[in-house]
Amino acid sequence: MHQRYKNLELVIATKHKKEAVLAPVFVSKLGVNCRTIENFDTDQFGTFSGEVERLDSPLEAARKKNRFAHEMTGCALAVASEGSFGQHPHLFFVPGNEELLLFSDFENGLEIVEKSIVTETNFAGQCIHSWKEAVAFAEKIGFPESAIILRKSESSHEDIVKGITDPKQFQEAVKNQLKNHQELWLETDMRAHLNPQRMAHIGALGKKLSERILSACPSCQSPGFGPVKNIAGLPCQWCSRPTRSIKTQVWGCVKCDHQEEKKHPNKKEFEDPMYCDFCNP
């Protein structure tokens, strides 16, 4: 199975240097030769800063990136990522970073997807009225390792300054803008090459995707056999009632309709009572 893609060319559809964390994984795990496209414009599919609205779902946006890269290079293999940021779906008032990676095998008509959501993100935005508040925001998000975007207001795209990583530039931009405006909007620049936390998340997901690509369907031997559905109901260790935690995982093939159920995917037969709605309401 590990020989399927050996020595084939894989294009990483990125504008923001994601090949730095993805290429070493795919070369090592799959034996492919990775390449990128110079001046590849992924901004046409949407920007985090909002100048170009993302109209598609993350999966569809990744599909368009891969299709575009395939048409430009002729490579049968392509990988694209798409990130989303906002409130974590299960944790109130906690920001989350969801990443999606799509591997497309155009010759064999295969799509293999992996997704992951983490709370380790510096995604943030704040209205500031002084240099002191600007400094506090910068320290909170890990500037200058992570870049900052400055704009007049949260919804304004006029005179937006993106990718600020130089402290002197940051100070000059903030102080100059505050001379003309009572308040400014600062936010974390979430583009991967300017955000080490996000880049690390993408790299970890790349490893997960490569492992899934190497997982063969027991029925047809196609790559990509892996989880397609989670079934909750892991019993509580105290009361034995079903919890929201995963009891069973359904694995499926991306090519045929073969599926298998795998119990206790997290290697737990019971859940801690702290996660039980009855013991810890």
Image: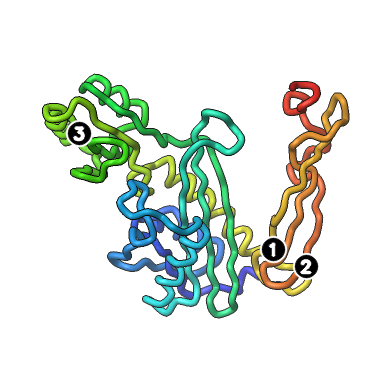
Q: Which mark is residue 102?
A: none
Quarter of the picture containing the N terminus is bottom right
Residues at marks 2 and 3, CA–CA distance in whole angstroms: 55 Å
Q: Is residue 78 above or below residue 191?
A: below
Q: Which mark is residue 170?
A: 3
Residue occupying the point 27% across, 25% down: 128
Q: Which mark is residue 225?
A: 1
Q: Could you tell me residue 156's position as x and y percent? A: 26, 41
Q: Could you tell me residue 47's position as x and y percent? A: 35, 52
Hey, what amino acid is under mark 3? Phe
Q: Is residue 114 above or below residue 103?
A: above
At mark 2, the secondary structure is loop
Residues at marks 1 and 2, CA–CA distance in whole angstroms: 9 Å
Residue occupying the point 51% across, 49% down: 99
* CB within 8 Å, label 1 to label 3: no
Q: Earlier in the sequence, mark 1 or mark 2?
A: 1
